[in-house]
Image (cartoon, rainbow, N blue to C red):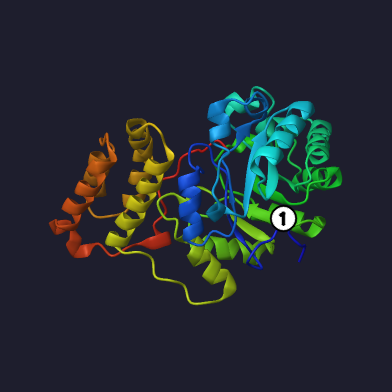
């Protein structure tokens, strides 16, 4: 098994994927508490970092309880990416720097960032070499299987990344043109694992802890990266960890436990954000994910999606726990995947 370029506590670590608007510090901390071995920041613009944009730099902050942590950056100019990695290294000292070559979102691709770079593998290599030359930290990459079906070549892309100096590679086994439709091709992950000497992370279509185990068994990847499957069920990490390790799987939280996790998450957001109203409005999406699958969840989500302050949330949860709906509300855990959206990473 290839060695990771930073210290991990598990033989087959489980990673929280970088996701714009989701993989913020409070959620990263919560996932670490629930067993995530490694977390990664949401992807951040190299130009924003380079220009020391305060909003961008604010998203780079992390606590000691989040380590090991990677900072993910994106951009299409090697010089800009090198400058950004140098600044991140000096100011924040994460455990590694990850380059986003996977984001399929139009506004990113339009500037040749994210998966847009996959149209030019010489550029991909130039960016990796520039970033690696600007920092002493390990440089890693996250890719897709190709720009489109005609250019789909995950092994070829991965080998180019390794040759340029990438120390770890995560593959979301879809092409850019697939976006999040269809199925991730886990066979491609297995082929990349066979071809590379560096650790390969498998990513795509992990909706339950059982999916994480099946991906690892199918691909023999060095680690599993969970993205949208963690929405509303951060305990998926401890369940996946146990399944892969062959140890007893902790019970999924019951309804009260779900609500307690949601409130703990909300309290961390309150401490992290400076705008309490804006933070509460943004947190509505998480609330919807936490209650998905519960009896009368449509009505419950409607109430939660109307909150304007965090104080309202606890009252809504308290009323639900006292209601008649509690007669059949056993926690469904990771076997009831949350509603999936399209995060920009």
The spot of residue 277 in percent (x, y) is 32, 32
Name the side, left or right, on which 263 lies relative to 5.
Answer: left
Residue 280 horizontal/vertical position (percent) = 33, 37
The residue furthest front is 91
User: In percent of the image, x 86 and y 46: which residue is there?
Assistant: 163
* Quadrant location of the C terminus in the rendered image: top right
In percent of width and height, residue 198 lies at 78, 56
Q: Can residue 114 be seen in this view?
A: yes
In the rendered view, does 122 fall on the left or right side of 90?
right
Q: Along the line of sight, which residue is nearer the eye, 138 or 175?
A: 138
| SS at circle 1 | strand
Q: Name the residue under label 1.
A: 200
Neighbourhood count class around disc 1 (C-alpha, 10 Å): few under 14, some 14–19, many 20 upward: many
In the rendered image, which quarter contains the N terminus? Answer: bottom right
Residue lying at 64% horizontally and 29% vertically, measured from the top left:
49
Q: Is residue 9 above or below residue 75?
A: below
Q: Residue at x 78, y 37 (%)?
A: 131
Q: How many labels does the image show?
A: 1
Name the side, left or right, on which 208 lies relative to 161.
left
Q: Nearer the viewer, residue 209 or 145?
A: 209
Q: In this view, does 150 lie above or below 321?
A: above
Q: Which one is in front, 43 or 69?
A: 69
Residue 312 location (% of width, % of height)? 23, 42
Question: Is residue 286 positioned above or below 337 on the image?
Answer: above
Regarding residue 101, the answer to whether it shows in the image is no
Q: In this view, does 260 lie above or below 343?
A: below
Q: Residue at x 67, y 45 (%)?
A: 93
């Amino acid at each position: 098994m290839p060695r990771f370029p930073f210290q991990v506590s598990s033989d087959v670590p489980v990673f929280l994927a970088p996701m714009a608007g989701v993989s913020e510090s409070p959620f990263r901390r919560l996932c670490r508490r629930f067993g995530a071995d490694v977390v990664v920041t949401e992807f951040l613009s190299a130009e924003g970092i380079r220009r020391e944009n305060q909003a961008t730099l604010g998203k780079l902050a992390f606590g000691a309880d989040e380590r090991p942590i990677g900072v993910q950056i994106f951009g299409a100019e090697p010089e800009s990416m090198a400058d950004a990695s140098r600044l991140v290294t000096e100011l924040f000292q994460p455990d590694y720097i990850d380059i986003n070559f996977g984001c399929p979102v139009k506004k990113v691709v339009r500037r040749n960032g994210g998966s847009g770079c996959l149209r030019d593998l010489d550029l991909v290599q130039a960016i990796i070499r520039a970033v690696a030359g600007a920092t002493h930290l390990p440089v890693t990459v996250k890719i897709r299987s190709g720009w489109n079906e005609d250019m789909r070549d995950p092994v070829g892309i991965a080998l180019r990344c390794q040759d340029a100096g990438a120390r770890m590679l995560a593959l979301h086994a879809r092409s850019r043109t697939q976006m999040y439709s269809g199925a991730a091709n886990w066979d491609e992950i297995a082929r990349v694992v066979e071809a590379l000497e560096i650790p390969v992370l498998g990513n795509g279509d992990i909706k339950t802890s059982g999916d994480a185990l099946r991906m690892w068994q199918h691909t023999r990847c060095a680690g599993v990266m969970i993205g949208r499957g963690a929405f509303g069920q951060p305990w998926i990490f401890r369940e996946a960890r146990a399944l892969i390790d062959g140890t007893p799987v902790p019970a999924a939280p019951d309804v009260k436990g779900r609500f307690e996790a949601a409130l703990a998450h909300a309290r961390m957001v309150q401490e992290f954000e400076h705008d309490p109203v804006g933070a509460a409005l943004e947190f509505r999406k998480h609330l919807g994910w936490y209650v998905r699958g519960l009896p009368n969840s449509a009505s419950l989500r409607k109430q939660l999606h109307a909150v304007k302050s965090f104080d309202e949330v606890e009252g809504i949860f308290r009323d639900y726990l006292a209601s008649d709906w509690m007669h059949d509300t056993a926690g469904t855990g990771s076997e009831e995947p949350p509603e999936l959206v399209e995060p920009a990473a």
